[in-house]
Image (cartoon, rainbow, N blue to C red):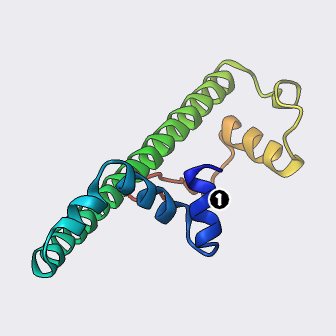
Amino acid sequence: MGMFSAAKNKAPNATLNYLSSKIRAQRNGVVDYLDSLDQEKRNKVIQISRTTGRKQRQASRIRSLQIREDISQRIALKREKTATAERNKIEKLLRSTSLDIAREFPSLADNIHSDLVDTLGGKVVGRDLGHVWYSRDSKK
């Protein structure tokens, strides 16, 4: 029976991290070192180690949150570049084609098709046009 199985049998409700740290402490001599200290010194060493561990864990969380935020910003930038490239490709195709958009874009809905024909034909007087802006900073 290994050390881990024995520890799991001894404390079945213990978490894996707790058992792992306990086994590591036994193997590297920390438990023997702490047992050799008097009570006051032992409590001081344990308190310092808890404080240090908490600070390291907080720093690790902050780093991982920053990494996640950076990754999400990169993904948003990549999506924006892809959308811009696709939009530029469609705009180039629209500028180069005649008013026969139905043949170039067969998947367009009828109302969008008629709006495009009117816009490209210069018949948009009296209509409300809207433009959608995208802000990289606000991701909207």
**Could you tell me which residue is drawn at 16 percent across and 80 percent down?**
39
In the depicted structure, whether residue 127 falls above or below residue 107: below
Instruction: Give the residue type at disc 1.
Output: Arg
- Where does the image place residue 136, in percent across and percent down from the top left? 40, 49
**Residue toward you, 78 or 40:** 40
- Where does the image place residue 112, in percent across and percent down from the top left? 79, 48
Relative placement, left or right, of 27 versus 54 is right
In the depicted structure, whether residue 18 falls above or below residue 76: below
Q: How many marks?
A: 1
**Residue toward you, 99 or 126:** 99
**Could you tell me which residue is drawn at 11 percent across and 81 percent down?**
40
**Residue toward you, 92 or 59:** 59
The extreme front residue here reads: 36
* Res 58 → quadrant: bottom left
The extreme top residue here reads: 96
Relative placement, left or right, of 140 versus 10 is left
The extreme bottom residue here reads: 40
Local SS, label 1:
loop
Relative placement, left or right, of 57 versus 140 is left
- Where does the image place residue 131, in percent across and percent down from the top left? 54, 53
In the depicted structure, whether residue 82 falls above or below residue 72: above
* Mark 1 surroundings: few (<14), some (14-19) or many (≥20) residues within 10 A: few
- Where does the image place residue 102, in percent across and percent down from the top left? 87, 31
**Could you tell me which residue is drawn at 70 percent across and 36 percent down?**
121
Q: Which residue is mark 1?
A: 127
Relative placement, left or right, of 96 versus 115 is left
